């Protein structure tokens, strides 16, 4: 029987199985890399600066992969994201960018 193939499930049936699955969704404002000495110097009031403008789009990740980018919005007092673009297969992932600067709070 190993030579026989199982009957393939139709595409609609397979999709129906997946429709009720939950997937982790993460909205990434920014990311960076820090030197260990800078990480160890973090304290309450420290500020980690990112090289990203306040009005730049944020990354939307599903299961760890960038699938879209969007604009941060406020909906009835809660944060939300308006989808502005859907990524291609390659996504928009970078290498985390250059090392950022950390400043201590007053």
Image: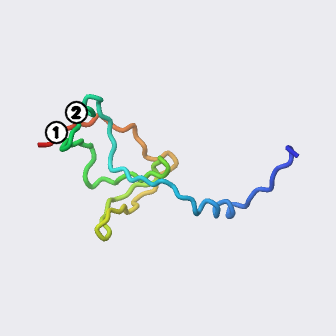
Residue contact at pointers 2 and 1, CB within 8 angstroms: yes
Residue beneath disc 2: 41
Label 1 residue SS: loop
Position of residue 70 measured from the top left corner of the image (x, y, whole percent) = 37, 58
Position of residue 52 measured from the top left corner of the image (x, y, whole percent) = 28, 47
In three-dimensional space, the C-alpha distance between marks 2 and 1, rounded to whole angstroms, equals: 9 Å
Residue at coordinates 33% horizontally, 37% vertically from top-left?
A: 97
In this view, which residue lies farthest toward the front?
A: 44
Q: Quadrant of residue 99?
A: top left
Residue beneath disc 1: 104
Which quarter shows the C terminus? top left
Q: How busy is the neighbourhood of tag 1: few (under 14 within 10 Å), some, or many (20 plus)? A: few
Residue at coordinates 72% horizontally, 61% vertically from top-left?
A: 10
Q: Earlier in the sequence, mark 2 or mark 1?
A: 2
Q: Is residue 48 left or right of residue 12?
A: left
Position of residue 24 measured from the top left corner of the image (x, y, whole percent) = 48, 53
Front residue (pair 31, 40): 40
């Amino acid at each position: 029987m190993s030579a026989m193939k199982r009957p393939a499930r139709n595409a609609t049936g397979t999709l129906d199985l997946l429709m009720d699955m939950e997937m982790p969704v993460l909205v990434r404002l920014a990311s960076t890399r820090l030197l260990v000495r800078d990480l160890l110097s973090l304290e309450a009031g420290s500020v980690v600066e990112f090289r990203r403008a306040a009005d730049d789009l944020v990354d939307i990740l599903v299961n760890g992969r960038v699938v879209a980018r969007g604009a941060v919005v406020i909906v009835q007092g809660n944060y939300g994201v308006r989808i502005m673009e859907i990524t291609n297969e390659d996504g928009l992932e970078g290498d985390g960018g250059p090392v950022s600067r950390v400043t201590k709070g007053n």
